[in-house]
Amino acid sequence: MKKHRKNSGFTLIELMIVIGIMVVLIALVAMGIPAAFNMVRNLQCNNNLKNIQTALTRYEDAYKRLPDRGGDLELRPEVRGPRLD
């Protein structure tokens, strides 16, 4: 009488199927990463705009006018750069 040994390992086909499933899952995650980064950038931009709006509203409430643009850029030599005359 022969004793039957029960083989507890994976067959090659089972291993290939598991690897294939893992590759598909990794590909799905990799496609979602750029979309997540884009969403974070959009949220950051919207948050910055809301902060600017809040700052302008508070300035206007305090001084009853909107702030000027911070001075005339043509009069500031460090912004104007060297003369080319």
Image: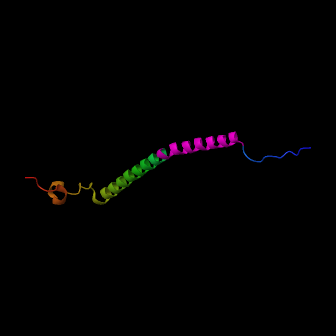
Magenta stretch: includes residue 38: no
- Where residue 45 sits: x, y (%)? 39, 50
Range of residues picked out in magenta: 11-34
- Tell me what residue is drawn at x 58 percent, y 43 percent: 23
Q: How many marks overall? A: 0
Q: Nearer the viewer, residue 58 or 78?
A: 78
- Where residue 22 sits: x, y (%)? 61, 44
Left or right: residue 65 compared with residue 45: left
Q: Quadrant of residue 75?
A: bottom left
- Tell me what residue is drawn at x 67 percent, y 43 percent: 15
Single out the residue that lies furthest toward the left: 85
78 vs 22: above or below: below
- Tell me what residue is drawn at x 69 percent, y 41 percent: 12
Query: Which secondary structure is most common in the magenta stretch?
Result: helix
Left or right: residue 16 compared with residue 40: right
Magenta stretch: includes residue 20: yes
Q: Residue 72: tell me if it is visible.
A: no
- Where residue 31 sits: x, y (%)? 51, 42
